[in-house]
Image (cartoon, rainbow, N blue to C red):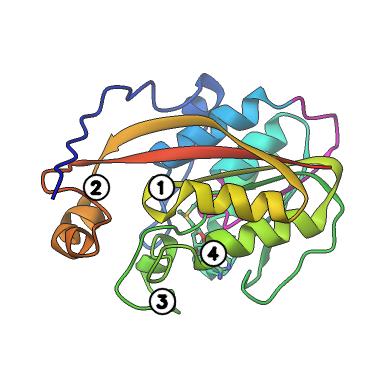
Amino acid sequence: MTTRVRTPTRVRTPLPPPVRRARLLTPPGVYAPQCDTALLTRALYREDIGDAAPVLDLGTGSGALAVAAARLGAEVTALDISWRAVLTTRVNAFLAGQSVTVRRRDLTSYLPRGPYELVVSNPPYVPSLSWEPPRRGAARAWDGGLDGRALVDRVCDVGARTLRTGGVLLIVHSALCGVDTTLSRLTGLGMDARVIDRELVPFGPVLRSRRAWLRRRDLIGEDEICEELVVIRAERS
Ligand SMILES: C[S@@+](CC[C@H](N)C(=O)[O-])C[C@H]1O[C@@H](n2cnc3c(N)ncnc32)[C@H](O)[C@@H]1O
């Protein structure tokens, strides 16, 4: 078998200055902002978000992206299945002096009304041992089902159905769950999709604990120690 060794050659500044300055509480059980959050935040800052533009954050966690979008002047709605995340985002928005509408919703069944100008999402995307993502517990923030795509696919669908014409979906996920699969899905949904950023990051504790299983599934090479994160931008035509 070929050995694919990946080394982190492009790990960059973790967060843009306005986000680094933000005070974000991340109590136990709520996803603390990481490289994926930072990549998506950078992408968000590159968008020309109009004043009071309706923005939707799917799987808001600590509210890092929701608060960042609100700072840019957007009118933000943030959704998460976890009550802890919902309450944390409310507190973080308050501490940042920003107004964010935060609701507890399960994305697998809920379809927001829209239309939105921008949808951002850092969904759970790690391939995990069972087909269904977990119903509870901290792993709900990262486990995306057997192929890692349970929530990724859903976010693509929700984005396509809730964006206005010309609206933009920004999604970050690992290459382990299939970049081409996401691009094809979005194209099939009538979106003009492309990768706008990528970064190699060392495996964290979750992927390190699954290395043998990921190797057996041929998702990683023998000595692989990094995963590639990608940010995909899709515009609704
Ligand atoms: C990787 S975390 C991202 C948190 C934050 N947006 C960030 O970038 O730091 C994914 C979030 O999705 C939420 N989530 C998982 N399954 C969900 C579902 N079915 N419906 C809504 N939110 C869900 C988790 O609770 C978690 O807060």
Q: Which mark is residue 113?
A: none
Mark nearest the camera among 1 and 3 is 1
Q: Is residue 79 left or right of residue 29?
A: right
Residue drawn 23% across and 58% down? 218
Secondary element under disc 4, as helix, strand or loop, is helix
Secondary element under disc 3, as helix, strand or loop, is loop
Quadrant including the C terminus? top right
Q: Residues within 10 Å of mark 1 (few under 14, many from 20)?
A: many
Mark closest to the chain's N terminus, 2 or 1: 1
Position in image of residue 157 (x %, y %): 69, 61
Secondary element under disc 1, as helix, strand or loop, is strand
> In the image, is residue 59 part of the stretch drawn in magenta?
yes
Which residue lies under the disc numbered 4?
151
Position in image of residue 207 (x %, y %): 24, 54
Mark closest to the chain's N terminus, 3 or 2: 3
Which residue lies under the disc numbered 2?
204
Rendered position, 14 above or below 3: above
Residue drawn 17% across and 36% down? 5
- Specify whether tag 3 is near ligand 1 (CB below 8 Å): no
Stretch of the chain drawn in magenta: 48-63
Q: Residues within 10 Å of mark 2 (few under 14, many from 20)?
A: few
Which residue lies under the disc numbered 3?
134
Q: Distance between the Cα atoms at labels 2 and 1?
A: 12 Å
- Specify whether tag 4 is near ligand 1 (CB below 8 Å): yes
Which residue lies under the disc numbered 1?
174
Position in image of residue 179 (x %, y %): 48, 47
Q: Nearer the viewer, residue 60 or 97?
A: 60
Mark nearest the camera among 2 and 1 is 1
Q: Is residue 187 left or right of residue 9?
A: right
Q: Distance between the Cα atoms at labels 3 and 4?
A: 11 Å
Secondary element under disc 2, as helix, strand or loop, is loop
Q: Distance between the Cα atoms at labels 2 and 4?
A: 20 Å
